[in-house]
Amino acid sequence: MIINNTYLKVSKTALLFIGCFAIVYFSASCERDDICPEDAATTPQVIIKFIDFVTALDINQPVDLEVRSADPAITDVISDVTSLDSILIPLKTDASITQLIFTTNATSEDESLIRRDTIDFLYTPQEEYVNSACGFRVNYLGLEVEFTRDNSNIDFDEDKNWIRNIIVQQRDITDETNAHVLFLH
């Protein structure tokens, strides 16, 4: 009987020791389930600022601006802006080009007042690891902007186009603190 009680005490102690060791081991090897904080770096959007073509300094808000994807399969308005000097536009994270149509006087009933320009944003997407809770974000490197006018074979036609020049201020989009692109119109 004495051997069985001793054996039983040793067995309980061993099981307790193994159980505690297992709990510590598995707790240390697991990451806690974090929530991505609101101030964590996320994929930035391109900031476009609208400038007066004549002065090249004054803010010039486009009238009834609408931005849509040039892809006919995507019908949602990306940005519907009526009275701001700049807008934030998301770029594709899984491609090296985003093609958008910028339209002024978008809701006008007079079709002759509606003016559209197709803009191509060319870049190299680069993933950056943020942390285990937030995952990855994408930065856009080497930004270039090209625009196609409705009448691309001739000089600017004020009746059809509204963007007169585009200036890239920052070629690498890594944050949303300053304007990346200026549209002069």
Image (cartoon, rainbow, N blue to C red):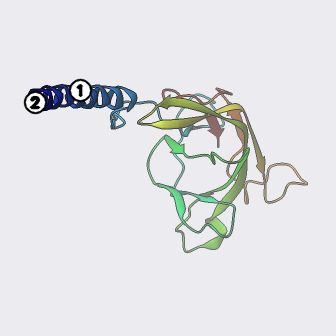
Residue positioned 91% across, 54% down in the render: 153
Q: Mark 2 or mark 1: name the one nearer the start of the chain.
A: 2
Q: Would you say 14 lies left or right of 43 here? A: left
Q: Is residue 180 left or right of residue 87?
A: right
Q: Residue at x 51, y 43 (%)?
A: 87
Q: Position of residue 164 (x, y in %)?
A: 72, 43
Q: Secondary structure at mark 1?
A: helix
Indicate the quadrant containing the C terminus: top left, top right, bottom left or bottom right. top right
Q: Which residue is mark 1?
A: 14
Q: Residues within 10 Å of mark 2 (few under 14, many from 20)?
A: few
| Frontmost residue, 122 versus 65 | 122
Residue at point 38%, 32% (across, down): 30
Q: Which mark is residue 5?
A: 2
State the image quarter where residue 143 is shown.
Answer: top right
The type of residue carrying mark 2 is Asn
Inter-mark Cα distance, 2 to 1: 14 Å
Q: In the figure, 71 relative to 27: above or below?
A: below
Secondary structure category for the residue under label 2:
helix
